[in-house]
Amino acid sequence: SQINLTTNGVLTAPYVPELKKLGIRSINLSLDTLDRERFFSITRRDELPKVMETFNAVLSHGIELKINAVVMQDRNIQDIIPLVELARSTPVNVRFIEEMPFNGGETHKVDHYWNHYQILQHIRESFPDITKIPDPEFSTSYNYQIPGFKGTVGIIAAYSRTFCGTCNRLRITPQGGMKTCLYDNGNFNVRDLMRLGKTDEELMHEIRRVLSHRAIDGWEAENQRDVLNPVHESMATIGG
C-alpha cells in the first residue's frame, strides 16, 4: 500500500521537500487548463503560476506526478491537446477525467459529458500514433503512450465507472472524511476519532468495519446515498 496526495497545487510547492521526506510516493495535481484566463474562469482564482511552481517542485524532487484534468464541455476542450503536450518532455501521467453530471453543485449541471471514448478520439486526431499500454494493477485509468513522449496519457471513466471492478482506493478528504468510493457520502470521519483519542488498533477496527460494507461499485454507492444528499461534488474535491 502507499499514500498519495491529491492537491490543487496552490499552496503546495513549499511543502514538497517535506512531503518527499514523509514518504509520499505520488502526487495528483488538479490542472484543467494551462491558459491563465481560463484557469481563473474555472477556479475563480488567478493562481496558475503557483500551481506550475508545484508542478516543477514535484518533478525536481523525483516524486511521481499525475495531472488530473476534468474534461468539461464548452469550458476546456481546447486545453486537452496542450495538456497532452506536458507529457512530451516531462515524465508525467496526464489523466483526463470524465465530468460528473453535477460537477460542483446545482449551478453547474452537465448537459453533455465527454466519455472516455470521445476523449481518446479527440487526442488521436492530433496524435494518431497513440497506443494503448498495459494498465498497472488496480489502475483507475486507461493508459496510453505517444511515441517520443517521456510521459504517458491516461483517461479515467469517472462517470461511466468502468474501473469499479479493480478499484482499491480509499480517499480521505481534508476534513477527515473517508470515502471508500468516489460516489459515497464519506460519513466515516477519521479525524474525529483521532481527536477522541482512539488508539491505532481501534482506528483499524473501525476502518475494517467500514470496508466490510463497501459498495460493489459506484452505481450501488450512489444509490445508497441519502436522498437529500445526492452526488454533486466537484472532482477537484474528491481526487482521481
Image (cartoon, rainbow, N blue to C red):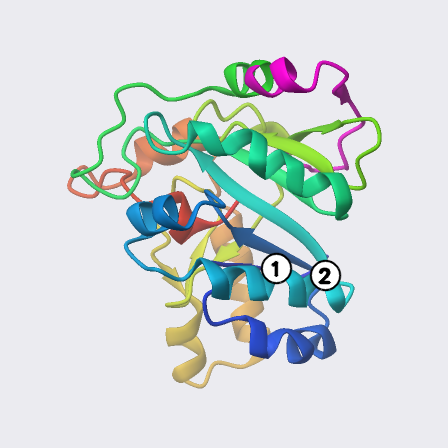
Inter-mark Cα distance, 1 to 2: 7 Å
Which residue: 27% across, 26% down?
110
Quadrant where the N terminus sits is bottom right
Amino acid found under the numbered disc labelled 1: Phe
User: In the rendered view, would you say 129 is above or below 195?
Assistant: above
On the image, the x and y values in percent for residue 64 come to 73, 56
On the image, the x and y values in percent for residue 33 come to 46, 43
Q: Quadrant of residue 151?
A: top right
User: In the rendered view, would you say 229 is above or below 237?
Assistant: above
Magenta span contains residue 128:
yes
Disc 1 element? helix
Q: 152 or 199, which lies in front?
A: 152
Disc 2 element? helix
On the image, the x and y values in percent for residue 176 come to 41, 67
On the image, the x and y values in percent for residue 145 come to 77, 28
Q: Which residue is mark 1?
A: 55
Secondary structure mostly seen in magenta is loop
Give the farthest residue toward the right: 148
Residue 119 appears in the picture as rendered: yes
Q: Which mark is residue 59?
A: 2
Magenta span contains residue 139:
yes
What span is in magenta? Answer: 122-141
Q: 124 or 211, which lies in front?
A: 124
Q: Label 2: how many residues lie within 10 Å, few (<14), some (14-19) or many (20+)?
A: some
Indicate left or right for 124 with 197 as reference.
Answer: right
* CB contact under 8 Å: marks 1 and 2: yes
Q: 63 or 161, which lies in front?
A: 63
Which residue: 39% across, 39% down?
183
Amino acid found under the numbered disc labelled 2: Leu
